[in-house]
Image: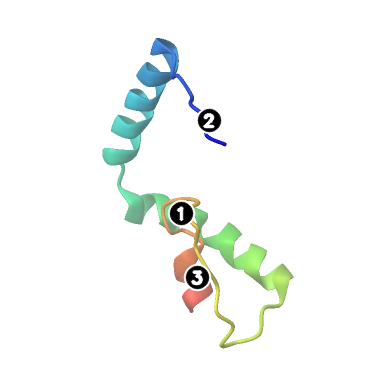
Amino acid sequence: MTTSTTMTPEMSALKTRLKATWESGDYALFAKYLEKGALEFFGRLSIPAGTRLLDVACGAGQLTLPAAR
């Protein structure tokens, strides 16, 4: 079964604006402000060292870098 989706002009315009916003960002600066929360989040998970994790493109890497440490 195949499904086709038609994007509305409004959704297309929104996607264009969001893409421009993300492409203009300074991710190093952005991630710096979120690092404390990311470290607290991983601290609550109690993930053992050496555990392999998968980043499924859920952001700018602000959780990936602390997880790798």
The circle on residue 10 is none
Residue at x-position 50% and y-position 58%: 56
- Neighbour tally class for label 3: few under 14, some 14-19, many 20 plus, Cα within 10 Å: some
Query: Tag 1 or tag 3, which sits nearer the N-term?
Result: 1
Query: Tag 3 or tag 2, which sits nearer the N-term?
Result: 2
Q: Are marks 2 and 1 in contact (CB under 8 Å)?
A: no
**Which is closer to the viewer, label 3 or label 1?**
1
Q: Is residue 32 left or right of residue 41?
A: left
Of residues 13 and 43, the one nearer the viewer is: 13
| SS category of the residue bearing label 1 | loop
Question: What is the quadrant of the N terminus in the image?
Answer: top right
Residue wearing tag 1: 57
The residues tagged by marks 3 and 1 sit, at their Cα atoms, a distance apart of 15 Å
Residue at x-position 46% and y-position 54%: 57
Q: How many marks?
A: 3
Residue wearing tag 3: 66
Query: Tag 1 or tag 2, which sits nearer the N-term?
Result: 2
Specify the quadrant of the image occupied by residue 18. Answer: top left
Q: Is residue 44 left or right of residue 5?
A: right
Residue wearing tag 2: 3
